[in-house]
Image: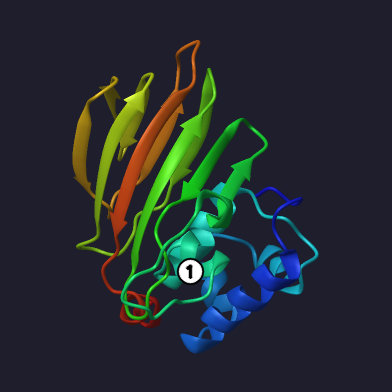
Amino acid sequence: MNPESLDMTVLGHRLRAERRRRGLTLADLAAASGVSRSMLSEVERGSRVPTVLILDRIATGLGTSIARLLRDEQAARTVLLRRAEQDVAWDASGWERRVLSPVLPGVEFEFMRTTIGARVDAGVFQPHAPGSREYLAVEAGTLRLSLDGEDVELGQGDSIFYAGDCQHGFANDAAEPCVFYLAMDLVGGTAHADAR
């Protein structure tokens, strides 16, 4: 996360509210997310800046998206997000995730634009609830997508659909940046989180 553009206190309050709304203790969320109880506590207190990968693991453990942890719900029929209003999750290793979709009541969907720098591995993200879906399209550069450890090479203009309930990793082995769009349709939401 980019600590300069993110209010850690607000993030901590949102995280705590989502955890409590789902009836989870810190220990429950630690078990569901694979993130230590102490790290979760520090993030909730606003004293620790999580990486994008850690924040994604927390969101996955809650059965939700990073977008829901960064922004309040908007109930309007039309929601315009100007570029300056879009949340950006930035990782010090050299990549960023720009959230292009609003957070809507009862909807667990996230549309994002990700830029991965040259020769950067963004890491492996945990499986979402069974039935979740992800759609990815490469705008520029090349991407090595791993799905449960099996690599798929994607180039400019390529697109792919895959079940979101697998481990998925994103890496750019090339000498130029890679830009791709990803749409996540998460299934389960609260029910998924409560079942853990």
Residue name at image x 41 percent, y 34 percent = 170
Q: Quadrant of residue 30?
A: bottom right
**In the image, residue 129 lies at what x, y percent?**
29, 64
Residue name at image x 37 percent, y 80 percent = 105
Residue toward you, 84 or 4: 84
Tally the marks: 1
**In the image, residue 132 lies at what x, y percent?**
24, 60
Does 186 sit left or right of 162 as displayed? Answer: right
Reply above or below: 6 against 45: above
Three-letter amino acid code at the position of disc 1: Arg
- Looking at the rendered structure, the secondary structure element under dot 1 is helix
Image coloring type: rainbow
Q: Which residue is mark 1?
A: 68
Residue name at image x 65 percent, y 68 percent = 11
Quarter of the image for the C terminus: give it: bottom left
Which residue is the extreme one toward the top?
A: 175
Does 196 sit left or right of 52 as displayed? Answer: left
Reply above or below: 141 against 13: above
Residue name at image x 69 percent, y 58 percent = 6
Residue toward you, 133 or 40: 133
**In the image, residue 94 lies at what x, y percent?**
61, 30
Reply above or below: 195 against 54: below
**In the image, residue 67 lies at what x, y percent?**
48, 62
Q: Is residue 77 visible?
A: yes
Q: Is residue 42 visible?
A: no
Q: Quadrant of residue 142?
A: top left
Few, some or many residues within 10 Å of mark 1 (<14, 14–19, 20+): many
